[in-house]
Image (cartoon, rainbow, N blue to C red):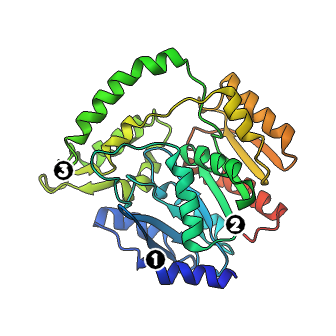
């Protein structure tokens, strides 16, 4: 079955060897991609274009699906993937509008519940019997939703620093909606324009500060590979290439009753890694939901480790052993 599934990926997806888009990014590629761990680019057709993904490893088993956070890309797994894919490949996806994946059509807006549907699409497309999930932030929320809505489809779920969408003051959320909608409309008018461009040093600092320093300066390079392009107007300058409409995604808060009903359906073996220096998933609501999961799922385990929201990217040597131990516990080859 495993050989058939991977063969499906190769036959029905466009597979290309990883080719850096510039000498700048080529240096990153040479450092990360070795002969021991082959890396390929996968293109998966969708109705509005393509989904791009990075396939780490060559084994014939069904890959672990790795899902990144909001406004990041598949490069977020570059430092840790080589530590995890010796005997089980990892398919690191670029969500729509991120990395190399197509943007949604003009006039449309991103919606967070589309992401669980995307997981289902990939499962059906590759004819997987189950889905193994390795997730961070927005990807973790999407993974939790899918694993809860379709509990029989997920064999393992690994979440880094997020499980559910955090609790916020609903009055403040609603107060911000008019401005978000206004900016969203404006962004629709600039889809064909090249964004502001910067030197390499400037764009690295900009990305670092844009994450409130969660992504360390030295880690930004891994996201730039798929998240920046060379300017056509200004030599030696680069611009952030993700869809600007992503900034105005409406992350709708959900009622406690709804979230509780959702998470009580989670039955897959679940590993939750919480970064203690991250502000996310630390509110009373998130803690309560985590405790409900722990009560209802005897295959749930949680680890608190030092680090920022992007702990897996900045300190993969801290995160990888926890994931390896979890995969071994549930007989997942690593």
SS type, badge 2: loop
Judge by depth and name the residue closer to the eye, 30 or 92. Answer: 92
Residues packed near mark 2 inside 10 Å, few (<14), some (14 to 19) or many (20 plus): some
* Residue 199 in the image, given as x and y percentages of width and height: 23, 47
Residue 288: % across, % down: 75, 28
Residue farthest left in this picture: 233
Q: CA distance from mark 1 to mark 3?
A: 28 Å
| 2 or 3: mark nearer the eye | 2
Front residue of this view, candidates 251 and 283: 251
Q: Is residue 302 left or right of residue 115?
A: right
Say whether disc 2 or disc 3 marks the residue closer to the N-terminus. 2
Find disc 2 in the rendering and name its residue: 130
In three-dimensional space, the C-alpha distance between marks 2 and 1, rounded to whole angstroms, equals 19 Å
Of the image marks 1 and 3, the number of the one nearer the N terminus: 1
Quarter-wise, where is residue 122 in the image?
bottom right
Identified at 31% across, 62% down, the residue is 24
Assign a secondary structure to mark 1: loop
Q: Residue 305 or 332: which is nearer the viewer? A: 332
Residue 315 visible in the displayed image: no
Residue drawn where x is 38% and y is 42% of the image: 246
**Residue shown at 33% from the left, 45% from the top:** 108
Q: CA distance from mark 2 to mark 3?
A: 39 Å
Q: Position of residue 136 (x, y in %)?
A: 58, 48
Q: Secondary structure at mark 3?
A: loop
Residue matched to label 1: 13
Residue 125 in the image, given as x and y percentages of width and height: 54, 71
Q: Quadrant of the C terminus?
A: bottom right
Q: Is residue 16 visible from the viewing direction of this image? A: yes
Which of the two labelled residues, at mark 2 and mark 1, occupies the earlier sequence position?
A: 1
- Name the residue beneath numbered marker 3: 192
Q: Residues within 10 Å of mark 3 (few under 14, many from 20)?
A: few
């Amino acid at each position: 079955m495993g050989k058939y599934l991977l063969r499906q990926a190769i036959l029905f997806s466009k597979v290309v060897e990883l080719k850096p888009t510039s000498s700048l990014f080529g240096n990153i590629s040479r450092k990360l991609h070795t002969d021991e761990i082959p890396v390929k680019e996968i293109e998966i057709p969708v109705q509005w274009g393509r989904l791009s993904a990075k396939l780490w490893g060559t084994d014939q088993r069904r890959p672990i699906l790795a899902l990144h956070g909001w406004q990041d890309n598949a490069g977020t797994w570059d430092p840790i993937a080589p530590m995890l894919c010796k005997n089980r490949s990892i398919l690191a996806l670029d969500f729509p509008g991120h990395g190399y994946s197509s943007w949604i059509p003009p006039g449309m807006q991103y919606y967070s519940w589309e992401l669980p549907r995307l997981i289902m699409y990939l499962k059906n497309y590759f004819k997987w019997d189950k889905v193994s999930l390795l997730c961070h932030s927005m990807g973790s929320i999407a993974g939790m939703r899918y694993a809860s809505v379709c509990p029989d489809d997920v064999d393992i779920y690994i979440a880094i620093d997020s499980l559910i969408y955090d609790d916020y003051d609903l009055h403040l959320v609603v107060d911000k909606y008019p401005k978000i909608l206004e900016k969203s409309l404006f962004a629709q008018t600039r889809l064909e324009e090249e964004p502001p461009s910067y030197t390499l040093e400037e764009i690295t600092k900009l990305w670092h500060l844009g994450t409130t320093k969660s992504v360390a300066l030295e880690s930004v390079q891994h996201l730039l590979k798929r998240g920046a392009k060379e300017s056509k107007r200004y030599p030696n300058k680069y611009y952030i290439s993700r869809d600007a409409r992503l900034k105005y995604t409406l992350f709708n808060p959900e009622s406690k009753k709804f979230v509780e009903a959702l998470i009580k359906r989670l039955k897959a073996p679940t590993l939750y890694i919480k970064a203690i220096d991250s502000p996310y998933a630390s509110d009373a609501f998130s803690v309560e939901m985590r405790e409900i999961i722990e009560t209802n799922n005897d295959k749930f385990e949680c680890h608190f480790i030092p680090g920022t929201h992007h702990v897996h990217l900045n300190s993969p040597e801290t995160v990888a052993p926890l994931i390896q131990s979890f995969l071994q516990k549930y007989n997942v080859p690593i």
